[in-house]
Image (cartoon, rainbow, N blue to C red):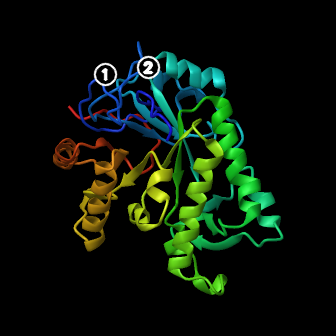
Amino acid sequence: MKRIGAAVAPLLLLAGCTQDADADPLGETAPENANVQETPGSWLYQLSGYENGTLDAVAAAPQTTAVVDLARDGGDDYWTAEEIGALHDAGKTVYAYFTMGSIETYRPEYDAVAASDAGLILNQWGDWPDEYFVKYWEQDWWDLVMQPRLDQAAAAGFDGVYLDVPNAYEEIDLALVPGETRETLARKMADLVIAANDHTADGLAILPQNSPELIEQEGYLDAIDGIGIEELWFLNEDIPCDEDWCAENLANTQAIHDAGKLILAVDYASDPANKAAACAHYAEEGLWGAVAGVDLDAVYPPCQ
């Protein structure tokens, strides 16, 4: 398994909980002289709106764990090793965000993905007109997107990757993939995560976002270093999460936490009372927490 570094800080300061600057997200023994964290605290989550196209605001933020997009522009203007190194010098641990179950039309790989003989592009994703689910189990998806992005994150010096849209297995139009079922697609998503872990060896931490129920798939829990999880307590935005699936997500997230994995939880709220409630839940559950605006395009304060 990969070692999770101290903590990260992208330009978006999500509100989480007060954190100890000497804590380690996984509770592991720190290397000598390492700046790691032992107790959960706040983390940062920003995918756009980087001030002046830099990570300077991330470096200055009090949070020590952050998730930022693999590229400053969401395209091919990738963060450099020098820029990520500057965050490390500021005591940050940084995870690179990208999707593994979908492709946005503005990503540099889109044209190649759309032209693939494997017919990778599937149905469009509801409220996200620029995003399409893909046949993430095909070799072309690995060759065109997954491996190059993993290699880019490693080359830039990220501590790990934050892999979004594992829930593609639930959202793909089954009519477009004859012979597949939700069960077979879940297995193939778990296999993709396992392949990412195998490819990166001990070089990058693997943190999928959401779909904590995938721990039911053999080999999945061993392949991940943690997960990101949205909307455990508040939906977009300020709506209490009281659906049955909210409780199921929390139970599966707790199981992953109990297995010693890092949990980065984020809720979307602007009401001060809801922010405080989410932060209290993070502290109670022992999770790294953040409360942000759903656009993830600004720096948000941590829990107090």
Quarter of the figure with residue 38: top left
Residue type, label 1: Ala
Outermost residue, top side: 33
Quarter of the figure with residue 173: bottom right
Q: Are marks 2 and 1 in contact (CB under 8 Å)?
A: yes
The answer, for residue 74, to whether it is visible in the render is: no
Which residue is painted at 26% across and 25% down in the image? 20
Quadrant for the C terminus, please: top left
Which residue is painted at 66% across and 73% down in the image? 122
Q: Residues within 10 Å of mark 1 (few under 14, many from 20)?
A: some
Q: Nearer the viewer, residue 17 or 30?
A: 30
Counting residues from the N terminus, which is met first, the one under dot 2 or under dot 1?
1
Q: Nearer the viewer, residue 156 or 252?
A: 252
Q: Position of residue 182 (x, y in %)?
A: 51, 79
How far, Cα to Cα, is label 2 from label 1? 9 Å
Q: Residues within 10 Å of mark 2 (few under 14, many from 20)?
A: many
Which residue is painted at 62% across and 42% down in the image? 200
Q: Position of residue 260 (x, y in %)?
A: 33, 44
Q: Secondary structure at mark 1?
A: loop
The residue to which callout 1 is attached is 21
The residue to which callout 2 is attached is 91
Question: Residue 214 bears which disc, if any?
Answer: none
Quarter of the figure with residue 230: bottom left
Which residue is painted at 42% across and 20% down in the image? 31
Measured along the vertical axis of the image, is residue 209 above or below residue 191?
above
Q: Nearer the viewer, residue 199 or 95?
A: 199
Residue type, label 2: Gly
